[in-house]
Image (cartoon, grey):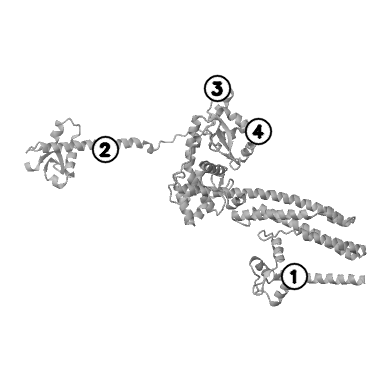
Amino acid sequence: MIEHGPLLERLLAGEFVCAVSDDRAFRRLEDEEVREQIDTYLRPLNRRLATNAEGSVYFLAWRQLNDEAREQLSRQLGEVLHSLMPMLEWLQLMQEAMGHDALVAPGDVLKPAELSARCEDNQSLREQLERLAGDSFFGSQSEQLDAQMKQVFKRLKEHGYLLQPHADRQVYLVTGKIDYLVDLVRLIRDEENLPVDDESPQAQESLL
Amino acid sequence: MKELAVSDEHELESRLIGTGVERLALLGKHADALMQGYSRDEVPLEALSDSALRRLLAARIVWRPDDQGGVKLAPRVRELIAEMLADETRRQVNADVGETLELVRTLVQSYREAQNQSEYWHQEQQLLRLRQAVDDLNGRFADAIDSLWQRLNSDFGFVSRLNDKIRENDRAQKQIVRLLDGLQLIDFDELIELVGSDGTLRKLLISQLQRQVSQHYTSLREVQSRLTELMARFRQQQSRSRLISGMAAFLREHPNFVPGNYARRSEVPDLINQASPLIAAAAPALDHEPDIRVLTDLVFQLPTPVHKPQAVAAARPAEAEEQSLVAASQQALKQDVENFYLTVIDHPDPMGISALAYLQDSDMEWGDEIWLFQVIAEYQGLPRSEQRAFHLHQAESRASDFNDLRLIHDVTLQLAHLA
């Protein structure tokens, strides 16, 4: 168990562990035996190892949902929902700024300077960033584009969606927590029966 | 007779070679124009002389689809260039197994006839063409498989939109199905019967071909499963992107939307069950004998704290308090002086009231000087109209015989209409 010490500490501290944030730890967690060991250890702390549908991130969940845990989960859910719209807008902004038609995915490299430059040349992106950065979730007070972008990235790093491998270099990696967010959106869509479609028209045709 | 035929064939062959070399050279000679025809729709004619164009047309390197239209690259030439460039946007996958098998059957029969008539040179020629037919078939599969791997490994990088990637992947999968169907056409039972006991043919059409075909099968199955995986990934990316944009659009339309509190349900969805952070804290403890030495060492290693002179800024709160105290006492003095003025108004005295006498009669504790100063300041602070209602008399003297500085000993305030 001692070799899992640092990993346990990170998990207990509420971190999401994925192949980007810690490749070695992630590969160890893919081993069922290790997962069982960790679960046994976590039992007296009323916690267990949990993962998303694709198994791309690991985090800790409550083992028994007592009143206190439910209270905490409600609060947490409220916070996540508060961040939902700005996060969705950020995902769309990144997609547009990079000219991709796929969302950013774990392992993608993002450079705020490059993204700022693209927003600078494009009034619509510029406005999107402005609105986004001013949202209370990102909380930028600045009117400078660079500062807004920097603040947005800082907050995303704090929330574990991004990783900055070198503290002195403005280069970020997207972590597996993005997958978790997308799964959460899907969960809300399904639970609330929202009219939000994620199948392409072609795929639907082939189903018919 | 036989001699003649052989020499005819030799002649024919050397003529073919001569023309081939001549026509291949055309490709190099007009490479610029032909490549422009490859990248655009038509071959530009400005760079070509009439005779050059005639030669290119005769060599079927270019053709004219209709009389009015321009000159275009022949499909085979386009394919050749695409193949040479590994240009996946235009590379064709076409194994043409059926036709090759037909050719093989014809050649084998012709070979047998030559063999029976002991026409060795002819027999050799047929064998050569058989080898070429088998090599071509093999090469076409190898090229097709190479093209598929190229596309797969580049994630269909030659198209940028996800929708195009999905379509390209779909197209590649259909090609694989066609290639596999083509391989299925090769019936080894039939070939075994066809070659009979001839060792050379057996080696060529059975053992060699069988080995190659089974390699192609393996490669195609592998590419196929990889393409399917990649397709699933493309579809997943597309689905994620659609989900996010759909949800964002929904939330924009319904800004007050609040989902249910899943944490209060009897069955809490696994995804939202995320335990609160727990910090595994620890502090130095001295209850474990062997640790004490380590801790002592650590303490010695601690850098000596440097006491810096306290910054002036640290005294600020006290200063602020003092300031507010001063302000408060200033306010009280002003209030007392105003009361003095009110007393003068309320008790009109033709002699006026001495400010010092008023101070001494009261239980106020102001110094004489500060009191007089405030009384004078109050008078000077009044609007001119109100100032006229009072008469302020200053009891003053010269500082000394040689100094004309006036010293005020007292002030007397009286209402102006009484003066």
Relative image position of residue B277 (x, y in whole percent): 52, 34
Residue at image coords 81%, 70%: B16
Residue depth check, mark 4 versus mark 2: number of the one nearer the observer? 4
Relative image position of residue B169 (x, y in whole percent): 65, 53
Position above or below: A28 against B229: above
Position above or below: B137 against B68: above
Residue nearest the observer in this picture, B196 or B331: B196
Label 3: how many residues lie within 10 Å, few (<14), some (14-19) or many (20+)?
Answer: few
Residue ID for mark 4: A33
Query: Which secondary structure lies at badge 2?
Result: helix
Residue ID for mark 1: B25
Amino acid carrying label 2: it is Ala
Residue depth check, mark 3 versus mark 4: number of the one nearer the observer? 4
Residue ID for mark 2: B327
Do tags 1 and 2 sit on the same chain? yes
N-term-proximal mark, 3 vs 2: 3
- Going by the image, does B216 lie left or right of B289? right
